[in-house]
Amino acid sequence: MKNIRNFCIIAHIDHGKSTLADRLLERTGTLQVTQGQMLDDMDLEKERGITIKSHAIQMVYPRGGEQFTLNLIDTPGHVDFSYEVSRSIAACEGCLLVVDATQGVQAQTISNLYMAIEHDLEIIPVLNKCDMINAMPEEVEDEIIELLGCKREEILRCSAKTGEGVDAILDAIVDHIPAPQGDPDAPLQALIFDSVFNPFRGIIAYFKIVNGTISTGQDVLFVNTAHQYKADEVGVLKMELSPRQKLGCGDVGYIVSGIKTATEVKVGDTITAVANPCSKAIEGFEEVKPMVFAGVYPIETEDFEQLRASLEKLQLNDASLTFQPESSVALGFGFRCGFLGLLHMEIIQERLDREFNMNVITTVPNVSYHVFDKHGEMHEVHNPAGMPDPVDIEHIEEPYIRASVITRTDFIGAIMKLCLSKRGELIKQEYVSGDRVELHYDMPLAEIVIDFYDKLKSISKGYASFDYHAIGMRPSRLVKLDILLNGEPVDALSTLTHVDNSVTFGRRMCERLKELLPRQQFDIAIQAAIGAKIIARETVKQVRKDVTAKCYGGDVSRKRKLLEKQKRGKKRMKEIGNVQVPQKAFLAVLKLD
């Protein structure tokens, strides 16, 4: 056990975590890296060049006549996947904090670092991309020293691309990261930190053994769900699953026990032995808090159950996804899903399409509000359709976040303007280093849900980094904005918005829909309404046949008769015709600008 090291790599997006993981795999002889980012095995990850899932892998590192077992977990860097990072940290004793020498300390670096400090992890600072022409190693080292309070010689310089400095990192892992603590003779206690669905073998759970040992064929109990299973196969995580007869204290591995039902495996659960169970479950595993909610509906109503099964399988692999059934007048039966952010929502939609062949409609993303009625009762409202009658509402509270934006001083003015337009309130501003400043804002979560991150990136030319955490609910003046098509409300397009923004938002929605709705044989009136008051209107003009073309000369009453006949037909058509809203119109609401 003294030769086991469990560690993860944490960093901001694009600071070179997965490339560094490749070099570590090469140096330890675990595998030959034939292409970049070997641990990113999802097509989506390769296409977008981001890590979406944490990936665990075991390496063997011989040093000084001893064999060291290194269990590495490569983590995502985007704020939307921070739950993956928190789960990886729970399974480790140390971490490599990777900072890009060309960009310096970013917002997600700081937030991941605080997460690691809370779990008492040993932190090894690594300065990556030192071989780049625009690297600023001295300035960035100063930032790391200020952040961590470490000595300059403790910061390891490397280049994950060329492999320079990687040996020093391996030595530092062995020397500085503590071996796992635990009692091999105590009852089995193992923490599940991830799981995946395999169509042939059922659900495979990944765990870290805190106390005791586990062996193939043993009867095990999942503490929280109270289900018993037989461990058909246990083993360690190499590039492929590698079976072992027995795993000991401190090991990271997997268990296959033929579990078919997705709900029976919960991330954060404890595995123990049936014969000699442990007295209590492992603590300190946080529940996920979704930030953004959206309705996900199957395009074909009969696919509802298939969508449920797909979401359950996806939830195994991504525990930060939450969902519950709901129904809508326009879209039928579907699910109300909770996501950690917009990128997370986009990735889930893409994975449903690719991995499960599910075509879905996603409604406008929103957050959950607390609505207090005149009797003092509180209702939690997730979507505008669930809003009580405005007459009964006393006041509404919405979730607020504390946002931290790190940027270069050149962009402060534009970023402050953006935050103020999103109802942000400046709390403090502090300089991280010479020309880098950190701004702290309190903002409503609803304002950053849709396009805040994209705008921040374009204003700052990609230099600003952004991170946030929830700080509770605050009272707010919100109204429900309905979109009516020919007088019929489309509940998938209705939103809750602040009174001050409602008129401009309604007008922009109508203009956008006018461009996207296909023309019909009759006029389509697009209206934005708050209650019974119409605040904006656009009309999609009808497609008309020139019925008077055959009249050349003659009396005007002949033309009028034909036009009146056409008018009566159009009127009847409008009464019975219905307007199909294309999927791109639902998505266009997200990209209003």
Image (spheres, grey):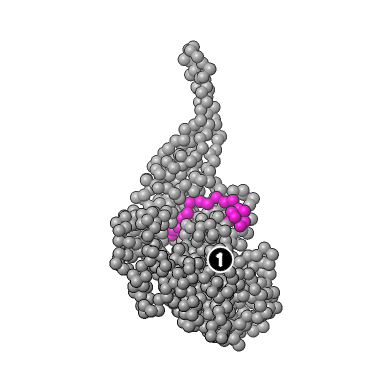
In this rendering, the answer to whether 182 lies above or below 84 is below
Horizontal relation, residue 143 to residue 193: left or right: left
User: Is residue 473 visible to us here?
Assistant: no
Q: Any magenta on residue 467? A: no
Estimate the x, y position of residue 326 in percent, counting from the top left: 55, 55
In this rendering, the answer to whether 55 lies above or below 395 is below
Estimate the x, y position of residue 428 in percent, counting from the top left: 30, 65
Q: Which residues are magenta?
A: 352-373
In this rendering, the answer to whether 133 lies above or below 61 is above
Three-letter code for the amino acid on which mark 1 is drawn = Met
The residue where tag 1 is placed is 38
Q: Residue furthest bottom?
A: 185
Q: Any magenta on residue 371? A: yes
Q: Residue at x 62, y 75 (%)?
A: 236
Estimate the x, y position of residue 76 in percent, counting from the top left: 49, 66
Horizontal relation, residue 140 to residue 239: left or right: left
